[in-house]
Every structure is written in C-alpha cells, then in structure tokens.
Amino acid sequence: MAVENVRKRLLNSTQALDRAGVPYAVVGGNAVAVWVAKVDKDAVRNTVDVDLLLRRTDLDRAVAALNEIGYDVTEVNGITVFVERASPSVRRGLHIIFANEKVRPYDENPAPDPSQAQLAEDGFKVIDFLPLLIMKLSANRRKDQVHLDDMLELGMITPELDAALPPNLRARLDELRANPQ
C-alpha cells in the first residue's frame, strides 16, 4: 500500500505540474527506479518520498498547481517540501531540489536543469541518467551509495559516462567500485 501511495503522489504531482506548464524533472529514488527498471525491473528499490527538480523562478506556479491537488508548501531545515493537506507528513512529501543551485552549500556541483530530462514510460519527466549519476555521487549519503552500487552491479555506468564525470566524482565512484557494499 505504501509503494502504491508513493506512486500515486508521483503521478498526481507530475500531472499537475504538466497541466500548469511548469518545467520539472523527477529525481532521487524514483528517477533511479526508472533507469534501473530499463535494465532489470526486479532490481528496483522502493522509496518513501517524491523528489522533484524545479527552477526557483517556477516555484510560485508550482505552488499554485500543487495547491489545487491538495498540497501545501512548507520549509523544513532549509528544504522546500510540499505536504498533503489532508495528511501532512514531511517524510511522505514532495521534496524540492532547485535547479542550477547547490543542494548543500558545500556541494561542488549544482543540481541540473529540468531541461535535462526525458519522458519516462509512465508519462512523467525524469532527469537524464548522467545528471542523476552526478546528483547521486554529489549527495553521497548511504542511500545514494546503495543506488550507485545497484547501478554498478547492473553495468549501467559505462566508460563513456565515467569519463564524463567531474574528477572529484570519478574518484568517489572509483572508491565505491573498490569497496562494494
């Protein structure tokens, strides 16, 4: 049921943004799931939230679109989150990452732009694989490392993608390769 609810939030929110003409891209665990499913549907991991990439200049339009379907915007620890009005929970929220900005002040690489997305099979826009790979390597949290381990195990990170990474992130990827979990 929880997996279905995440999927419902993903589809409802992206459809609302599409109707409003707000550029976005699905990032995070749901984006990883889209890319992993192209290689091995059985390797897809579940996630509890929806991460969306938006331009800060489009936030007001996103607020209006998501308000219409029952979401209210809030800020938690400097993160913009949309929570369901009927059952507010930051954990189950729509977490916003702002395009072309660093997620954390000490990050070396800014988040990508929603223009670097493509239409997923299910009709929503998902960030392209290389920008997603850069985001996961930049975040470097345990759950990001698990996603990266999955991508490595499935052979998704080609030598061409490896060569396209910034040097600091290539070194981080080499470390993951040397120490698989």
Image (cartoon, grey):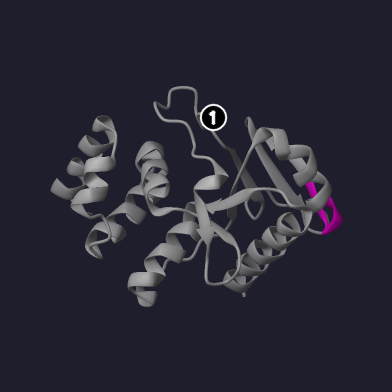
Please name the amino acid that badge 1 sits on: Glu
Query: Which residue: 64% across, 62% down?
Result: 10
Q: Is residue 16 left or right of residue 29?
A: right
Query: Which residue: 67% across, 34% down?
Result: 56
Q: Most extreme residue toward the left, as rendered?
A: 178
Q: Is residue 59 left or right of residue 155?
A: right
Judging depth in this view, the residue of 63 and 100 nearest the camera is 100
Measured from the top left, where is residue 18 in percent x and y? 71, 58
- Residue 13 inside the magenta-drawn segment: no
Judging depth in this view, the residue of 27 and 140 nearest the camera is 27
Judging depth in this view, the residue of 163 and 171 nearest the camera is 163
Measured from the top left, where is residue 61 in percent x and y? 79, 43
The image shows residue 37, relative to residue 27, as above or below, that is: below
Q: Quadrant of the N terminus?
A: bottom right
Residue 73 image-quadrant placement: top right
Magenta span of residues: 67-72
Q: Quadrant of the C terminus?
A: bottom left
Residue 17 image-quadrant placement: bottom right
Query: Which residue: 41% across, 39% down?
Result: 139
Q: Secondary structure at mark 1?
A: loop
For disc 1, the marked residue is 101
Query: Which residue: 64% across, 55% down?
Result: 92
Within 10 Å of the Cα at label 1, are there few (<14), some (14-19), or many (20+) other Cα atoms?
A: some
Measured from the top left, where is residue 129 in percent x and y? 39, 53
